[in-house]
């Protein structure tokens, strides 16, 4: 029985040390993996990201040019529209003709009334 | 060819208003009832004619028609033109209300003059009537441009400079106007010649309109 205990203690110690060692190893490996994982990423990303940047820049410039073009068209449209709004159109012409005919209609009515009344009196 | 608000001195504007009122008064005095529809139609045409822009090189011109209005209406042209200009200034923002008197003078005086001239020189044939119409139409615009220069002279401009500018700018208008007037007069002479002789009363006996004899 004592011999069993005597043999158990070193075995326990052995297992304990094994566990501790494995844990440190795992943590080390993980750290190493992490460093290994980031380092190559950074080294391969820098040219790729600068290419990306150039692409984005070109896209932005293209978009800018397109928007400028469209804005110029819209500005021209607005100028034409405001000119068209300011310019008298068919409505004003018809309104004026209506005024004139109405005015002369009233004048003719008054004149006819005066003419009709004068012979009667 | 419209004078805008604030260009002329106040005294000139007021004087032009007074002269216009006088002209309208005279027009109303000689106005006859049978002429009312004709005056209405001619006024409407005058009112709308300024909207018809004819493209001319880089710019565009529009008809003024004082000559033809005078030729068709005689002394009543002044009333017609004032009404037309008033509505133009209200509806089209052509010229200003304070300058309405001056604008009416600018168009009305040539109309009166051209009316008298047209009646004096038009003969009895189609050709003489057409030529008289062309002369009246062209001269109306010419006189209007001259009066414009005269009005601008009162606002401190150089008379001959403005006159030259106005005349040069209106040379195409004068030509177009003469052509349009000749066309209108020749057309009316062919289809409704009695429309051309209205003002002198003794001519109604010649045309033989029964309604003319019973007129008061």
Image: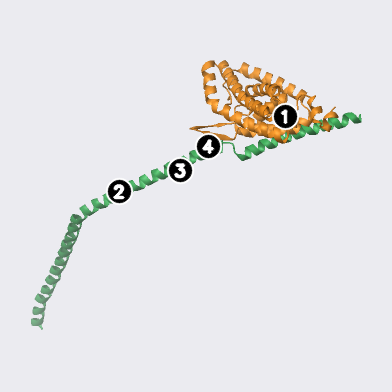
- Asked if residue B187 can be seen in this view, the reply is yes
Above or below, comparing residue B151 to residue A15 in the picture: above
For disc 1, the marked residue is: B196
Q: Determine which residue is flagged by label 2.
A: A58
Query: Disc 3 and disc 4: Cα gap in Å?
Result: 14 Å
Residues tagged 3 and 4 counted as in contact (Cβ below 8 A): no
Instruction: Determine crowd level at label 2: few under 14, some 14-19, many 20+ residues with C-alpha closer than 10 A.
Output: few
Label 3 neighbour load within 10 Å: few <14, some 14-19, many 20+: few
For the residues bearing labels 2 and 3, Cβ distance under 8 angstroms = no
User: Is the N terminus of chain B in the top left, top right, bottom left or bottom right quadrant?
Assistant: top right
- Name the N-terminal-most of marks 2 and 4: 2
- Which of disc 4 and disc 3 is earlier in sequence? 3
In this rendering, the label closer to the viewer, 1 or 3: 1
Residue closer to the observer: A100 or B110: B110
Residue A83 is tagged as 4
| Front residue of this view, candidates B184 and B60 | B184
Q: Is B37 situated left or right of B165 in this image?
A: right
Residue B214: image quadrant is top right
Residue A63 picture location, percent across and down: 36, 48
Left/right of residue B7 with respect to residue B116 in the rendered view: left
Q: Which shade is chain A?
A: green
Q: Chain of mark 3?
A: A
Q: Secondary structure at mark 4?
A: helix
Q: Position of residue B49 (x, y in %)?
A: 62, 33
Q: Tell me which chain the residue with mark 4 is part of.
A: A
Q: Nearer the viewer, residue A55 or B30?
A: B30
Q: Chain of mark 2?
A: A
Kindly identify which residue carries mark 3.
Answer: A74
Q: Residue at x 50, y 32 (%)?
A: B59
The residue at the point 39 percent across, 45 percent down is A67
């Amino acid at each position: 029985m004592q011999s069993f205990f005597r043999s158990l203690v070193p075995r326990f110690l052995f297992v304990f040390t094994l566990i501790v060692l494995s844990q440190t190893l795992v943590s080390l490996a993980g750290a190493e993996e992490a460093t290994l994982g980031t380092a190559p990423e950074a080294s391969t990303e820098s040219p790729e990201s600068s290419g990306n940047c150039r692409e984005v820049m070109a896209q932005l410039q293209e978009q800018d040019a397109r928007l400028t073009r469209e804005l110029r068209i819209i500005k021209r449209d607005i100028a034409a529209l405001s000119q068209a709004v300011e310019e008298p159109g068919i409505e004003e012409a018809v309104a004026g003709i209506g005024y004139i005919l109405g005015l002369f209609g009233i004048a003719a009515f008054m004149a006819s009334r005066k003419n009709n009344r004068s012979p009667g009196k | 060819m419209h004078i805008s608000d604030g260009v002329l001195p106040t005294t000139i504007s007021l004087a032009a208003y007074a002269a216009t009122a006088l002209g309208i008064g005279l027009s109303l005095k000689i106005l006859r009832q049978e002429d009312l529809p004709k005056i209405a139609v001619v006024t409407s045409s005058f009112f709308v004619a300024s909207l018809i822009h004819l493209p001319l090189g880089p710019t565009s011109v529009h008809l003024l028609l004082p000559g033809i209005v005078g030729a068709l209406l005689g002394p009543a042209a002044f009333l017609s033109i004032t009404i037309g200009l008033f509505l133009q200034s209200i509806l089209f923002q052509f010229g200003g209300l304070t300058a309405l008197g001056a604008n009416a003078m600018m168009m009305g005086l040539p109309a009166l003059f051209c009316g008298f001239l047209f009646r004096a020189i038009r003969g009895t044939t189609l050709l003489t009537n057409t030529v008289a119409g062309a002369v009246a139409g062209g001269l109306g615009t010419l006189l209007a441009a001259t009066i414009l220069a005269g009005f601008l002279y009162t606002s401190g401009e150089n008379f001959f400079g403005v006159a030259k500018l106005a005349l040069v700018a209106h040379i195409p208008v004068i030509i177009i106007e003469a052509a349009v007037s000749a066309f209108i007069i020749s057309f009316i002479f062919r289809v409704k010649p009695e429309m051309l002789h209205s003002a002198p009363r003794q001519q109604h006996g010649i045309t033989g309109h029964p309604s003319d004899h019973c007129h008061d």
